[in-house]
Image (cartoon, helix red, strand yellow):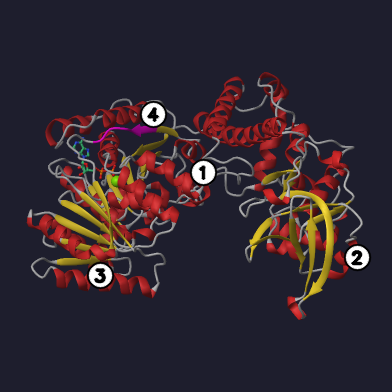
């Protein structure tokens, strides 16, 4: 029986509460899995004259030669002078003065462990750990674990050092029962992995760096292996248990469109992806496929061709977009593309009401509508399809797990699912978030595209900017001016936007300027969009509502105001709104003069490359994977404790390969050797809600 947390030595009921609340630690096992965030090399003793202000924790050996309590009231502190033969340093304590005073004895030698700081031109150290008459040998070759402690933990006196003793107590307490191995023995043997008990011990108390690396590898591997195993197993279950709608032939529509209506030849990549989808359609298995393609790579055409296969087989498709604007635009485009073809296409968004709505609902129910475009309102319980066979989800990062899951709830025989992502996410992240989907990549741009030329301007260059915009407008082109909108209801943001609109209207009296933002009524939005799409308005002042999908090939200038307030992938998305026609396009990033280092780096990256994959990788490195748009709601099954998707790409690939190998032998993990894995999976999934239906 595991010991309850509060009975662990050094914990008690109050600290147990704090640990649960602050660090999500509820059991002994959780303690063992509360990994250090770094280690301090305690094998080395520094000299005072070696210290610099940028050092982290160091240890010194020497003597206190003087001490006194100075100051009054809250400013009171104990100040001691510490010498080690190389120099002298002030050491101060602001709390527990009496206790410390009693500990310090000028006759003895002390080991100090703390962080040096430079204060008033001199080196000093506040609140170091001290140890009287240290045994010098004891410290050789030790790496001391440092644990993250929140303010709440610190208030309960749970410092890193206390955490360390709680970890020791947890090891002591599990000594009899032992730590359970969670990977199959064959896997450990074949890849020469460290065992779990050894790895856990070594991650907390590494004897040396080499052992620490091995322990880390084992634990990262395990974490990533189980994520991949879970994803791939659920894919196996989908494939074997969920029958898919099967098409025998591509049907007449695709060929007709290709011969008579198509405006341009699909790129090789587009053809390949449609081919891959066709492979799924005829397999009899339900398709779960992700199409990854950079902004402007032509994902919409791929979707259209797939929907035509479905229509040609007498069944229905839906295309879901993240915003109404985008849904409208897809609708307009498709209607244009399909003119003259006998395919009934409808638009169903929240703002389609009354008789019109009823007509569409009827058409969907009786099967006369083949393709319906809309927002997530489409998958609400009120919409009944006659024979839904394909669901295309555009710009997936806006669609949550729950919404995807609704597709299953409303359909007994699930439709094929095609997810299209615009900002290509790094491969490692894709493997994790979409690990249960098959992936197709559009890695080729339509011919004749010129990379968008990107420049960084400061606000003081505004005149130059306006002159440039004017010269482009005079060539007949159009321009976007985008303002950040961090919170939809922040007054400030709207003020900026509206002033921007006024300013542009005044600067360009000869051209029509329109404005789009999320707070407009749908008809106002539609009208502004219409003006811009038709070319009547030449400048569009907008918020990021235009970030995804909007397609006006004649627009050649994208001005991003306060570019410092956008993330990399958002900047890339916005830039993707231009460079869609054959003309050279420009993106201008406007910022203040003073920029933080990270911000400057983002702007530099934008000016250097237009490759969405490179930008996604850079974004992940700058921000960490947790922050990347979409990861929160996209259902990464369990929170990562030790791996880092940005750094551990290789371990991830290796873990995925191992998971594939395991499942090749035992697709449903039903053999006796797999018990260890099913048990672990159940444990992990028990901790993560809402995860089994992420496909
Ligand atoms: P995204 O992948 O960002 O959704 P779109 O599907 O909106 O890109 O396509 C971007 C633009 O490229 C559109 O104007 C579209 O008509 C055009 N396009 C798509 N495929 C091709 C092609 N094979 N040849 C030429 N232009 C294409
Ligand atoms: Mg698109």
Q: Which tag is nearer the camera, tag 2 or tag 4?
A: 2
Whether the magenta-drawn stretch holds residue 1 is answered as no
Instruction: Report the Cα–Cα distance between label 1 and label 4.
Output: 19 Å
Instruction: Report the Cα–Cα distance between label 2 and label 3.
Output: 66 Å
311 or 485, nearer to the observer: 485
Q: Mark 1 — residue?
A: 694
**Disc 1, SS:** loop
Q: Mark 2 — residue?
A: 102
- The circle on residue 500 is 3
Query: Range of the magenta residues?
Result: 440-445
Decide if residue 429 is on the left or right side of residue 578. Answer: right
* Residue 457 visible within the image: yes
Among the two numbered marks 2 and 4 on one chain, the one whose residue lies closer to the N terminus: 2
Q: Which tag is nearer the camera, tag 1 or tag 3?
A: 3
Whether the magenta-drawn stretch holds residue 443 is answered as yes
Q: Mark 4 — residue?
A: 280
Structural crowding at the residue carrying mark 4, measured as other residues with C-alpha within 10 Å and reported as few (<14), some (14–19) or many (≥20): many
**Residue 463 position in % (x across, y down):** 18, 65
Q: Quadrant of ligand 1?
A: top left
**Disc 4, SS:** helix
């Amino acid at each position: 029986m595991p010991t309850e947390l509060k009975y662990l030595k050094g914990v008690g009921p109050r600290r147990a509460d704090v640990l649960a609340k602050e660090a999500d630690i509820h059991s002994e096992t959780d303690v063992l899995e509360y990994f250090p965030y770094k280690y301090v090399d305690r094998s080395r003793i520094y000299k005072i004259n070696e210290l610099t202000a940028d050092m982290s924790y160091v240890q010194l050996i020497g003597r206190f030669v003087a001490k006194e309590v100075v100051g009054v009231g809250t400013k009171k502190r104990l100040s001691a002078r510490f010498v080690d033969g190389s120099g002298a340093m002030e050491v101060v304590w602001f709390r527990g003065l009496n206790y410390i005073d009693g500990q310090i004895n000028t006759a003895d030698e002390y080991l100090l462990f703390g962080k040096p700081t430079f204060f008033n031109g001199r080196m000093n150290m506040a609140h170091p750990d001290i140890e009287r008459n240290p045994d010098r040998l004891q410290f050789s070759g030790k790496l001391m674990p440092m644990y993250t402690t929140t303010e709440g933990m610190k208030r309960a006196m749970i410092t890193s050092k206390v955490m360390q003793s709680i970890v020791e107590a947890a090891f002591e307490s599990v000594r009899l029962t032992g730590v359970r191995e969670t990977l199959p023995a064959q896997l450990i043997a074949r890849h020469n992995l460290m065992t779990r008990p050894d790895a856990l011990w070594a991650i907390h108390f590494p004897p040396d760096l080499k052992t620490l690396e091995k322990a880390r590898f084992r634990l990262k591997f395990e974490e990533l292996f189980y994520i991949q195993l879970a994803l791939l197993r659920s894919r196996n279950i989908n494939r074997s248990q969920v029958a898919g709608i099967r098409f025998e032939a591509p049907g007449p529509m695709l060929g007709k469109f290709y011969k008579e209506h198509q405006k341009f030849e699909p790129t090789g990549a587009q053809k390949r992806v449609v081919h891959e989808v066709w492979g799924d359609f005829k397999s009899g298995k339900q398709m779960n496929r992700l199409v990854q393609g950079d902004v402007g790579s032509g994902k919409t055409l791929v979707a259209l061709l797939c929907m035509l296969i479905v229509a040609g087989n007498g069944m229905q498709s839906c295309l879901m977009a993240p915003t109404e604007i985008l849904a409208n635009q897809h609708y307009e485009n498709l209607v244009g593309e399909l003119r003259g073809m006998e395919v009934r296409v409808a638009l169903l968004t929240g703002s389609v009401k009354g008789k019109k709505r009823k007509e569409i609902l009827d058409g969907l129910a009786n099967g006369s509508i083949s393709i319906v475009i809309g927002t997530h309102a489409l998958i609400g319980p009120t919409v009944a399809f006659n024979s839904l066979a394909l669901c295309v989800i555009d710009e997936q990062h806006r669609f949550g797990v729950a919404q995807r899951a609704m597709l299953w709830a409303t359909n007994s025989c699930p439709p094929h699912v095609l997810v299209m992502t615009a900002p290509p996410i790094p491969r490692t992240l894709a493997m994790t978030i979409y690990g249960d989907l098959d992936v197709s990549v559009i890695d080729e741009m339509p011919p004749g595209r010129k990379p968008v030329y990107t420049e960084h301007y400061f606000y003081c260059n505004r005149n130059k900017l306006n002159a440039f915009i004017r010269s482009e407008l005079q060539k007949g082109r159009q321009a976007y001016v985008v303002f950040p909108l961090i919170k939809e209801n922040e007054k400030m943001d709207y003020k900026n936007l509206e002033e921007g609109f006024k300013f542009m209207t005044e600067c360009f009296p000869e051209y029509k300027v329109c404005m789009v933002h999320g707070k407009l009524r749908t008809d106002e939005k539609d009208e502004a969009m219409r003006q811009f799409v038709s070319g009547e308005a030449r400048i569009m002042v907008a918020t990021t509502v235009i970030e995804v999908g909007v397609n006006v090939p004649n627009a050649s200038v994208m001005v991003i105001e306060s570019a410092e307030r956008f993330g990399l992938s958002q900047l890339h998305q916005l830039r993707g709104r231009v460079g869609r026609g054959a003309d050279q396009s420009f993106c201008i990033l406007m910022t203040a003069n003073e920029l933080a280092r990270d911000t400057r780096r983002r702007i530099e990256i934008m000016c250097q490359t237009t490759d969405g994959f490179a930008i996604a990788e850079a974004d992940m490195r700058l921000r960490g994977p947790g922050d990347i748009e979409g990861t929160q709601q996209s259902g990464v099954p369990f929170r990562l404790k030790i791996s880092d998707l940005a750094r551990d790409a290789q371990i991830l690939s290796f873990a995925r390969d191992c998971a594939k190998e395991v499942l090749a032998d035992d697709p449903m993990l039903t053999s006796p050797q797999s018990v260890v894995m099913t048990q672990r999976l159940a444990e992990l999934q028990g901790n993560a809600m809402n995860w089994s239906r992420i496909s």
